[in-house]
Amino acid sequence: MDITDSGVEQELSWQVPLYEQFHRHPELGLAEHETSAAIAAKLAGWGFDVRHFGGTGVVGVLANGTGPGVLARADMDALPVAEATGAPYASAVPGVMHACGHDMHVVALLGAAKYLAEHQDTWRGTYTALFQPAEETAAGSQAMLDDGLAAGVPRPDVALAQHVMPTEAGTIGTTPGPVLSAGDSIRITIHGRGAHGSMPHKAVDPVVLAASIVLRLQTVVSRETTPGEFAVLTVGSVNAGTTANIIPDRAELLLNLRTYDQAIRSQMIAAIERIVRGECSAAGSPQEPEFEYYDQYPLTSNDAEANARITAAFTRTFGSDAVYRTAPQTASEDFSRIPDAFGIPYVYWIVGSVPPETYRRAVENGTVDTDIPANHSPFFLPAVEPTLRVATRAQAAAALAYLAAQPG
């Protein structure tokens, strides 16, 4: 069956105020206490069996006879960003805002959960609505798994997730295979020999060493990966010393990698370590460099068969003009750890959030990258209509593609 516009219109009357409430009161990862409590209360009121994992993580299970299992996930943490949107419901928490749309994800999934709870005559199986903390730090999904998630809920047959992006509102982007990149952050500490700035001959200068490393790292993508293969290496920070006349004894570099292929990822990591060690050796560094890997996000790669099934459901629900094949995004996510822990396929799709006229005008002018705020911008603010309605329908339609007693 398909979920129609009329089937969700009644939901918007409570969804919009709840969305504004969450947006006005954002909470950072693993501290989403008020958000978690509000979600749990809603689910319990609709008859879900509510369970908690990973501190603030919330799961609602709704069993409705014999049938397949669907797990639908929404992330719920905010970012340490000061909001500049000027919205009447802008963040009331200094320095914290929902700059990535997770509040929209939460309310859309709640809307789908309520719809399924109230239309149990149309489907059979088990629906699990999962609200995950701390996506922005890549810690939330693992925290839920470490707290027993995989054994603590019925095993699903498929997992679903979506994300609002700065594309045209009213549209949905799907793709088989990679949809979000793997992401790795690396902290590299290199060691020198400190000395007075007037006596450089007595030093091994880690500032010069860091500069050499940064320049050489630019060749990892340009000269060591096959042209056409996706790979990004960013040196986001170089830090050494505190004053002008002291040569410090160490420097720290922060790197970030994005890849769609595990082999390329491994190749890049090996190249980075080889270059850093080689430059340190050439400079006479008195100590081996140190590598710390953190904020590591797995690749998000959609199962082809499941993606085709969900895409067909979206096409039935929204029409072919609203559904398109998206290019893989260079952002990263930790959602896939959850279905991977169950050993099940998953589908992750993109929901547009920019007013159509605004987006089309920017496309015509070639100013999409400059005129439309991206996720994590202090100006990022999804258009509530039609984004919330479409995101709610998408979650329900995707679930019903598996759960419906007689799919249409």
Image (tube, helix red, strand yellow):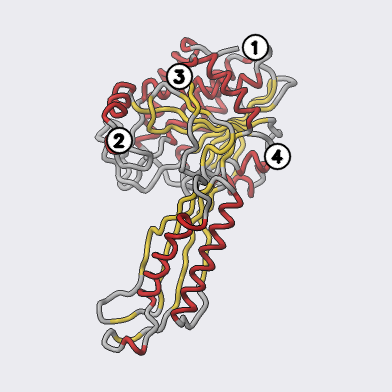
Picture coordinates of residue 352 (x, y %)?
A: 41, 27
Query: Which of the 4 image quarters holds residue 219?
Result: bottom left
Q: Callout 1, which amino acid?
A: Asp
Label 3, residues with CA under 10 Å away: few <14, some 14-19, many ≥20 = some
Picture coordinates of residue 68 (x, y %)?
A: 71, 24
Which quadrant is home to the N terminus? top right
Task: Kindly identify which numbered label has been placed on residue 343.
Answer: 4
Q: Earlier in the sequence, mark 3 or mark 4?
A: 3
Q: Is there CB contact under 8 Å for labels 1 and 3? A: no
How far separated are the C-alphas under marks 1 and 3? 28 Å
Residue at 59% in and 56% down: 266
Residue that numbered label 3 is attached to: 322
Q: Callout 2, which amino acid?
A: Ala
Q: Is residue 186 above or below residue 359?
A: below
Closer to viewer: mark 2 or mark 4: 4
Q: Is residue 287 above or below residue 346?
A: below
